[in-house]
Amino acid sequence: MRPPTDVFSEWADMGKDAGMESGHAPAVQEILAAAFEQMDENFEFDAVDAGCGNGWVVRLLSSRSDCKSAFGVDGAESMIARAREIDTAGEYYEADLETWVPNQPVDLVHSMEVLYYLNDIPGFLDSVRSKWLRDDGIFAFGIDHYQENEACHDWSEKVGVRMAMHSESEWRDMVEGAGFEILRMFRASPREDWAGTLAIIARNCV
């Protein structure tokens, strides 16, 4: 099994990052909308996108009038290079998500299609809650690789990357076990042949 950062760097070099953006956009729009529903009206926020790829969610967040700042972090060298090429004024970090922490906590952490690649998911969740987010900050994330989504069960073998497989209830237990309060848990953008993206909106309540 190869490191996921190597695979994603190759995909960026091949131009597949654009396809990832278009494919994930509907679910991400739903996830972010659900996150902003939990924030006070006219609240100005800062945000980080964990596993930002080519930076498209950072750019999406930055375009909002209520966004003070948004930046991205990703372990794939070519993805960060692509993000910096597209968004020369943006702030992007190439780093290991499991050890990196922002210079100061933020109001919103977003992540799409990242967490199941990590070696220590509970450890990362604890780090996001205790080191990435301010008190009452929101963690909003989506994953397509989970037990109830049968269409994803052969992905690890196809891609050649280790992917943790957990059920929806196991994801709930991990998030709550890290000290988060789950505000919403739903499937974003389901289709007849697709269970949808498992979306969790959680608050740092510790």
Image (cartoon, rainbow, N blue to C red):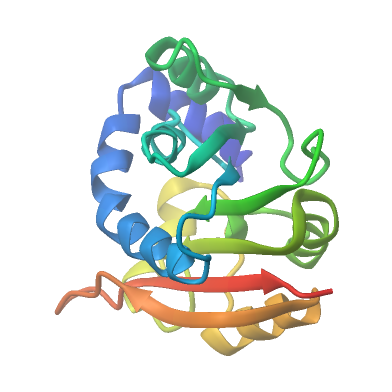
From the top left corner, tell me how far across and down residue 37 is, in percent. 43, 70
User: Which residue is depicted at the point 61% across and 73% down?
Assistant: 202
User: Which residue is depicted at the point 32% across and 57% down?
Assistant: 29
From the top left corner, tell me how far across and down residue 118 is, in percent. 68, 53
> Compared to 123, does 63 lie above or below?
above
Image quadrant assignment for residue 94: top right
Question: Which one is in front, 122 or 105?
Answer: 105
> Compared to 163, does 195 lie above or below?
below
| Residue 62 in view in this figure | yes
User: Which residue is depicted at the point 40% across and 52% down?
Assistant: 158
User: Which residue is depicted at the point 44% across and 34% down?
Assistant: 62
Q: Quadrant of the C terminus?
A: bottom right
Query: Quick one: which residue is furthest to the bottom in this view?
Result: 169
Could you tell whether 35 is left or right of 86 in the image? right
> Compared to 162, does 96 lie above or below?
above
From the top left corner, tell me how far across and down residue 92 is, in percent. 59, 24
